[in-house]
């Protein structure tokens, strides 16, 4: 058996890594041909996918074959020695022409005369991926000249084959998942729902247009006027969006998302420009099978009843400050409404935190909702 060298192992790992990094089947196909060629030098590499009913799903060759030769393949494919062997034995491992027929037998075929000889091809090695009864995925490498593919070449391809099969399945699954997410997000877009899929690191994996716009607005507020915007979200966010897949949540929401406390409690973060009311973020927990949660942004226009706030032992001014925070007000807007300095609002807020036994504005608001005796569902039914 051929002993692999370090460079062989590196080439194999490079191919497997690139194939497994594909987000969809197009990326997988684009990775396989150059990766295989780097691992096993060849003049022509072809990649083909055929459905169980015979429909060709993909037929790629590098370099591209002359169109005039396509008819030769259609007319003589049934003569192909390696294909005939595969259909007879169902053994999809790599085999060479020379493993199946002599050069004289190959040269006597119409396939050779009309296809391979015009291309200057004398040698081929081909293999198929274990893809199930409804799909065939085959890769063929071709060379001219006197040098056939070696035992090392065959072994390299054989080692790569199961890993490429798994990478193909992974890419197909990612493609289906992306299509499903796109369809769901389109539905959210149509309904005006602000929903994002976010990972444990606080990075957006997918986002509906309304959520992208709201998060983008919050991000712009945090960065201040005149800051450059991130390019718009592909496919869903529309004009003016500044949050797209791969971006982190705006800083304030990300801190809440990463906090070890119970993030199922709605977190107020901004009032949407031009609308009365409070925007809140909710986190819908994932199942154990994924590291992604849903971020849902909703509007709660009504606050906690003032008598409930007063029952917490707050002064009239502290009640007014907490009520304003519950309704989405910022320190500056609350100060302007009450006719006091922002630092005065901060002092009232600190007093509220001390009386409620909390450490932040978000925790104070959550405590107020709890004191009101409202469940999360009941809170949401209070939306405008």
Image (spheres, rainbow, N blue to C red):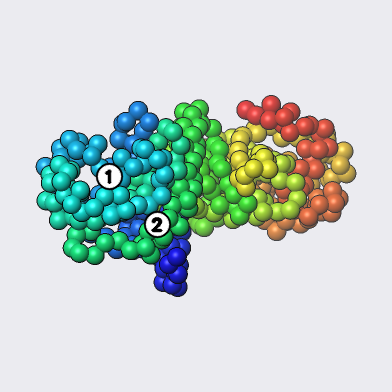
User: For mark 1, what is the residue?
Assistant: 81
User: For mark 2, what is the residue?
Assistant: 157
Within 10 Å of the Cα at label 2, are there few (<14), some (14-19), or many (20+) other Cα atoms?
many
| 156 vs 3: above or below | above
Q: Secondary structure at mark 2?
A: helix
Q: Is residue 379 left or right of residue 90?
A: right
Q: Is residue 172 left or right of residue 75?
A: right
Which of 128/87 is in front?
Answer: 87
Q: Residue at x 45, y 69 (%)?
A: 3
Q: Which quadrant of the figure has residue 343?
A: bottom right
Q: Is residue 337 left or right of residue 156?
A: right
Give the distance between the C-alpha atoms of the residues marked 1 and 2, in whole angstroms. Answer: 19 Å
Q: Quadrant of the N terminus?
A: bottom left
Residue 87 position, x and y percent, is 36, 37
**Numbered badge on residue 102:** none
Which of 235/278 is in front?
Answer: 235
| 321 vs 144: above or below | above
Which of 128/280 is in front?
Answer: 128
Residue 335 position, x and y percent, is 66, 50
Q: Residue at x 51, y 43 (%)?
A: 206
Q: Residue at x 62, y 28 (%)?
A: 384
Within 10 Å of the Cα at label 1, are there few (<14), some (14-19), or many (20+) other Cα atoms?
many
Viewer can see residue 243? no
């Amino acid at each position: 058996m051929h002993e692999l060298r370090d460079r062989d192992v590196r080439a194999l790992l490079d191919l497997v890594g690139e194939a497994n990094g594909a987000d969809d089947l197009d990326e997988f196909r684009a990775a396989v041909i150059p990766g295989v060629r780097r691992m096993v030098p060849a003049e022509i590499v072809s990649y083909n996918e055929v459905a169980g009913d015979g429909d060709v799903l993909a037929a790629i060759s590098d370099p591209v074959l002359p169109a005039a030769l396509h008819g030769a393949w259609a007319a003589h494919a049934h003569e192909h020695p390696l294909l005939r062997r595969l259909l007879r034995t169902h053994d999809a491992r790599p085999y060479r022409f020379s493993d199946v027929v002599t050069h004289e037998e190959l040269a006597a075929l119409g396939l050779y005369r009309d296809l391979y000889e015009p291309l200057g091809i004398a040698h081929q090695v081909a293999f198929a991926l274990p893809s199930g009864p409804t799909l065939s995925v085959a890769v063929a490498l071709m060379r001219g000249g006197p040098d056939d593919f070696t035992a090392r070449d065959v072994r390299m391809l054989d080692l790569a084959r199961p890993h490429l099969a798994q990478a193909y399945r992974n890419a197909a699954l990612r493609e289906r998942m992306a299509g499903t997410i796109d369809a769901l997000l389109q539905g959210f877009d149509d309904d005006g729902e602000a929903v994002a899929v976010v990972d444990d690191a606080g990075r957006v994996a997918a986002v509906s247009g309304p959520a992208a716009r709201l998060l983008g607005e919050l991000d712009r507020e945090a960065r201040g006027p005149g800051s450059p915007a991130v390019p718009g979200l592909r496919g869903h966010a529309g004009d003016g969006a500044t949050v797209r897949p791969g971006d982190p949540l705006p800083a304030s929401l990300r801190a809440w998302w990463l906090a070890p406390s119970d993030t199922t409690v709605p977190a107020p973060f901004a009032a949407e420009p031009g609308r009365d009311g409070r925007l809140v973020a909710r986190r819908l927990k994932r199942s154990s099978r994924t590291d992604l949660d849903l971020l849902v942004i909703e509007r709660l226009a009504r606050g906690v009843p003032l008598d409930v706030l007063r029952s917490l032992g707050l002064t009239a001014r502290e009640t007014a400050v907490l009520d304003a925070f519950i309704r989405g007000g910022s320190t500056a807007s609350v100060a302007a409404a009450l006719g006091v300095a922002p630092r005065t609002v901060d002092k009232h807020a600190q007093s509220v935190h001390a009386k409620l036994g909390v450490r932040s504005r978000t925790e104070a608001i959550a405590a107020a909702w709890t004191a009101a005796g409202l469940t999360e569902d009941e809170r949401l039914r209070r939306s405008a």
